[in-house]
Each structure stands twice: as C-alpha cells, then as structure tokens.
Image: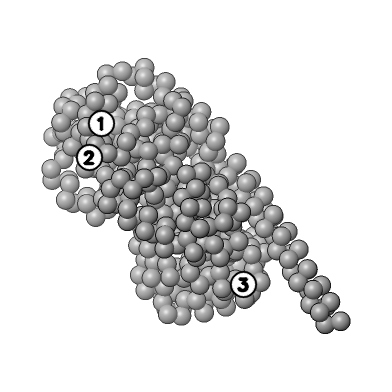
Amino acid sequence: MHIAWLGKKSPFCGNVTYGREVTNALLERGHHVSFLHFAQEESVAELLPEELQEVSIPCLYKSQIYTIPSPKASRVLSQALRRLKPDVVHASLTLSPLDFVLPEICEELNLPLVATFHPPFDRKRRNLTSGTQHLMYQLYAPCLANYQRVIIFSEIQRDLLMRLGVPQDRLAVIPNGVDVERYSPGLSRLKSELDARRLFVYQGRIATEKNVESLLKAWKQSDMGEGSKLAIVGSGPLAHTLMPFYGSDLGIIWLGFIADEQRRIEILRGADIFILPSLVEGLSLSLLEAMACGAACLATDAGADGEVLDDGAGVVLSTQRVSTQLQTLLPMFRDHPELTALLGRKARQRVLDRYTLTRNITRLEELYRDLLLNHRTYLASSRLFGRDEAG
C-alpha cells in the first residue's frame, strides 16, 4: 500500500515523534511511504529515490504548536498528491490553515483521507489553559467531520468530539504506541553521573500548559535532601524564567533538550520516578516511554494520561492544586523504594498490555484497508450509477 503522510519533521515535538515512529514502522512492514512535510523553503524538493520519498511543502513559519503555510502551499500539495497517486493520504494535523482545505483537495483527487488529531485537552474546563484548548476543539470539529477517518488517542477524546458534532463512524481510537524493545528497563549511568540516590525526572516542553513550575515549587518546599535529584529534560519558553529560582542548590538539574534518542532512553532507565504535572494533554508519548522503561509514574488526569495510569498502573493527580499533592507524594516516593519498584513493574506491564507500537500499527493497517475498500466500493457504485443514468 502507498501512504502519503503529511506532517512535520521539525521542530521536535510529539507530532514529529509520532510521524517518525509510525512511518518507519509502516516501511518495515513493506508499505510505500511518501513523506510530505513543511519546510521554510520557497520551492518543493524533488522526490528522492530512497525508500522514504520526501516532498517539501513551503511554509512561512512553524513551531512546536502550529504551522503557517505559504500562499502557494495548497497548490504545491495538490500537485504533489496528483503526481504521487497514493492509495491513502494520512495527515498528522499540524494546526495549520491547510488542515481545513485538505479534505477538498483529496475529494477532488479521489483520494481517501485520514487525519490524526493531536491537540491536548482536559476532560473538564478547570482552568484557563484547558478552556483555550476546548475552543480549539470547537474550531476544528466541523472540519474533522469532512475527513473520512479521524484518529484520536482515547475514549474521552472521542466523546468530546462527538459532543461537538463529529460523527461517531468517522472517529477511530488508536492510542499512541511505544517500541517496547527499544524502550525497556536496562542499565543506566545517569544516577552516578548526577550523584543521585533517588532520581526523579520530568521530560517535556517547559511551557505554561505543562505546569512544570508546580513540580518545582513542590520540590523546593519538600526539602528532599542531598541524595535526591530532579532532572528536567526539555526546553521551552519558560525555561530561562524558572532556572534562576530552581537550581542545583535544590538538587534540580536542568539537562535541556536532548535530541539523541539513546540518551533519552538512558535517562528514563535511570529514573526511579517520572512526573508529568500537565494542565492539558493528549496522550503523552513521554509518559508511555517512561512506563515502558520501568519508571514509577505520576501524572495528572489531563487528557488521556489518567486513563493510562488508572487501576494501579501509576499515581493519578488532579490538575488542581498539583503542588500541594506533590508535596505529600515526593517524600513518600523518596523514602519507599519498594513502592517505586512495584509501580515501575506495573507501568511496564500496562504498556505491554495496551500501548505497544506493534499493536498500534496493526490497527492502523486495518483502518487503511477498511477505508480503501469502502472508497473503491463507493467509486465503483458511482460509476455504475453514472452509466445507469446515461442509459
């Protein structure tokens, strides 16, 4: 099967990781993949002869959150799809105006169209951040109804979109998946590098919606002692604001953005506890990766993260008063390594049971085949109807 994948290669974010993991897995299963991605160049790159063909779609600006295409982007995209003639188009939506015209382009070209809808959410509008994300869902719902299938990551997300008018038969719940061979428990030198007896880790953007400051405040007020360290992995707009107030004197180590995947795996393998204090989420791939590596996990019930950790696979926090909750939990996890080990095993097992990349790709292939069959049946019946009318 030939899949035209529309997404992002940079800057690094969950969307980029999702696109890389899924397209690589599809290639390994023998599918032909063309990767159409946004680039800040004025011309479209020629198709490459390698196994993964690439086409650049011109854009004026792109960030971890949204993309602004150039005025000619829709024309370039249409021409590329017409030339590639894929069986299916899969758009990993980048919060771009192009998302709203893509159904029209694919309808004109008679191409089946799938979208993956990534924006974080909270099941309740409990704060300004979650209220803003809800507006994003309201804006996108009419557009998503024009896609033949929309992949989301949880039942909660499906119910929210259905309430906003997206037909149930358009929605497919296929959670994020982790390569459990790569992301697995193993040896790590990180604790000795950081001189840590107990190691707590946060990995993600340093931004308002991630609520990292609540974790830092709780750590500062908990007096965790010299043997405990908190490693902050990632970058973002709030990093330089927070770093002067929460430094190494408190046992907080800022590791910054780490591009090397093997190094990120080593960090997760070295972690005793992984903490995600977000106000809004989708389904955090970082959380799933930490669980697969055997870290005990604490996360808020934003998005689908609470669903991932329910029934004892981790500790679920409310998005309200996160700092207060963590002030109770941090010393407990510092002082009870047996609890950490138990939760780490349960976290790993939860990923094996529900969130493997292998299962994710198998379900995606089934969706493609079903969509392609329905599309061919529709085209055949349309041609037959046309002949009957002509007769």
Residue closer to the observer: 3 or 377: 377
Q: Amino acid at mark 1?
A: Leu
Q: Earlier in the sequence, mark 2 or mark 1?
A: 2
Q: Amino acid at mark 2?
A: Ser
For disc 2, the marked residue is 214
For disc 3, the marked residue is 107
Point 24% across, 55% down: residue: 237
The reply to whether dot 1 and dot 3 touch (C-beta < 8 Å) is: no
Residue 82 visible, this orientation: no
Tell me which corner region of the image, top left, top right, bottom left or bottom right, holds residue 356: top right
For disc 1, the marked residue is 326
How far is disc 2 from disc 1 in space, using C-alphas? 8 Å
Mark 2 crowdedness (10 Å alpha carbons): few <14, some 14-19, many ≥20: some
Residue 354 in the image: x percent, y percent?
A: 54, 36
Residue 39 in the image: x percent, y percent?
A: 42, 69
- Whether 110 is drawn above or below 11: the answer is below
Point 37% across, 29% down: residue: 315
Q: Earlier in the sequence, mark 1 or mark 3?
A: 3
Q: Amino acid at mark 3?
A: Glu
- Whether 44 is drawn above or below 99: the answer is below
Point 69% across, 55% down: residue: 369
